[in-house]
Image: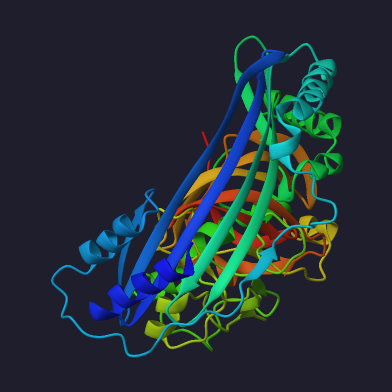
């Protein structure tokens, strides 16, 4: 972005009465190599470029974007956004400090996918396929993929901000399908982190494929659960997806400022038992959902949302913080230049506690051990959720018994939180992708093993 063109954009926005003008310029190169049926099925790569311009009138947001970076097109975009607004005059001259450039990943170790190309991924994919098929002849299909992205962003605003970000992420996926001749079941693992092909060394395709194959075979031979209200011990890592969906979204100021959250006005109140502490942390080194600065240029931070059961704050962006009356938490995020930023999660998790898995299981007479969660759905305004259990076991007389499938967990997030009575120490996080009003973004969910005293379990 030419600084002189940026100044003209700011002047045009201010003349149209805007209180704040922002320019977000982005170029992202991404690629995926995928395997299925023991052969390379797909190889895709592409580059996307564009510029987004945001005008704020108080907390009213006007946003537009274009892939035409000419001065004429950008000024026309400002005029279109501000059409009908009362004209004013720029109050000050716009000056930029020297540009600050930030990389979210480990620069010293970074192996650039744009240089190394697709061939580097093939060995990973074929090793995963071979390992899964070696477990059992009931494994009828294996899918695997490696996806990378490299993004360069320039962010300028009418307050003098001048920053550039380099972001890179890598994610692998292994999916295994097994069949007993009558039914087919599928499960997957999909870890990810910040960086380039240097990260492939952190993932064993054999370990991921073996874990998937063994899990799906256990569930293939399982019977179906008898549903009802019961205590549930929920596994660590991706089990945190329920907190993310049912409680994380209602704790974003994007929900709170619209009055669409069950947690509105409850800062300082107890919403859980003293064993519950929940955090959204954008600073975890190398973790999939981390970033050093958010998409408004605010430093990210470790934001304690719930501490010992007490609601402490919300996740906020510029607009949300102003409307709700809290400090910015560095939570403004967007999928790309096509979206205006709003408050979103980064790495959101229930913090580790002191209870053991054995003690949780021993405390349950009849219930469910949801060792691994799958996908589901949630209504952010009400917190109502419905999530499938990928791997489940009956708990009977304080012991883990036979595997069961077909279980779903049904409830409302703000009602489930007070029922979390035990929190383990086996904390883990898992990579995911979250979709909301500012697009699909990389996030991390997590938790240790937890016990929920009562939840509705749907069965077959």
Looking at the image, the residue that sits furthest to the front is 4
Q: Is residue 88 left or right of residue 44?
A: left
Quarter of image, res 145? top right
Q: Nearer the viewer, residue 383 or 203?
A: 203
Q: Count the marks.
A: 0
Identify the residue at horizontal 54%, vertical 70% (top origin): 331
Q: Where is residue 225? Give x, y as percent.
A: 60, 37
Q: Is residue 247 left or right of residue 133?
A: left
370 shown above or below 285 = above
In the rendered image, is residue 157 in sight?
yes
Q: Nearer the viewer, residue 227 or 272?
A: 272
Identify the residue at horizontal 63%, vertical 77% (top origin): 303
Q: Where is residue 266? Give x, y as percent.
A: 46, 84
In the rendered image, is residue 281 in sight?
no
Q: Where is residue 7? Give x, y as percent.
A: 40, 74
Quarter of image, res 421? bottom right
């Amino acid at each position: 972005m030419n600084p002189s063109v940026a100044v003209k954009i700011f002047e045009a926005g201010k003349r149209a009465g805007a209180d704040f003008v922002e320019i977000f310029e982005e170029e992202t190169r991404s690629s995926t190599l995928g395997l299925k049926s023991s052969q390379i099925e797909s190889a895709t790569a592409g580059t996307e470029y564009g510029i987004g311009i945001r005008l704020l009138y108080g907390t009213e947001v006007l946003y537009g974007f274009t892939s035409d970076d000419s001065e004429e097109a950008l000024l026309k975009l400002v005029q279109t956004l501000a059409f009908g607004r009362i004209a004013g005059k720029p109050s000050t001259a716009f000056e930029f400090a020297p540009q600050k450039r930030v990389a979210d990943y480990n620069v010293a170790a970074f192996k650039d996918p744009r240089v190394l190309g697709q061939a580097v991924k093939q060995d990973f994919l074929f090793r995963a396929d071979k390992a899964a098929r070696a477990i059992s002849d009931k494994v009828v299909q294996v899918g695997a993929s490696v996806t990378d992205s490299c993004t360069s962003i320039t962010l300028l605003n009418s307050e003098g901000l001048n920053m550039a970000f380099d972001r890179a992420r890598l994610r692998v996926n292994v999916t295994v399908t097994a069949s007993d001749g009558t039914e087919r079941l599928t499960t997957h693992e999909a870890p990810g982190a910040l960086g380039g092909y240097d990260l492939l060394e952190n993932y064993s395709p054999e370990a991921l494929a073996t874990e998937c194959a063994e899990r799906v075979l256990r569930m293939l031979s399982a019977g179906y659960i008898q549903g009802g209200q019961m205590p549930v011990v929920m596994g660590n890592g991706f089990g945190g997806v329920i907190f993310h969906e049912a409680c994380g979204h209602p704790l974003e100021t994007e929900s709170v400022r619209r009055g669409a959250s069950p947690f509105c006005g409850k800062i300082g109140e107890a919403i859980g038992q003293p064993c519950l502490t929940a955090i959204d942390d954008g600073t975890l080194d190398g973790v999939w959902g981390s970033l050093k600065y958010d998409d408004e240029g605010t430093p990210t931070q470790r934001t304690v949302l719930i501490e010992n059961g007490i609601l402490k704050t919300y996740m906020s962006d510029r607009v949300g913080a102003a409307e709700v009356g809290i400090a910015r938490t560095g939570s403004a995020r967007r999928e790309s230049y096509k979206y205006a930023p709003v408050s979103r999660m980064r790495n959101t998790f229930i913090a580790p506690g002191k209870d053991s898995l054995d003690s949780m299981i021993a405390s349950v007479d009849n219930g469910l051990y949801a060792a691994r969660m799958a996908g589901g759905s949630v209504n952010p305004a009400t917190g109502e959720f419905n999530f499938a259990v990928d791997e489940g076991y009956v708990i009977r007389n304080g012991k883990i018994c036979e595997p069961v499938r077909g279980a779903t967990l049904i409830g409302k997030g703000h009602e489930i939180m007070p029922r979390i009575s035990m929190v383990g120490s086996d904390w883990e996080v898992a990579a995911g992708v979250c979709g909301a009003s500012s697009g699909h973004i990389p996030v991390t969910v997590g938790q240790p093993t937890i016990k929920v005293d009562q939840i509705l379990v749907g069965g077959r």
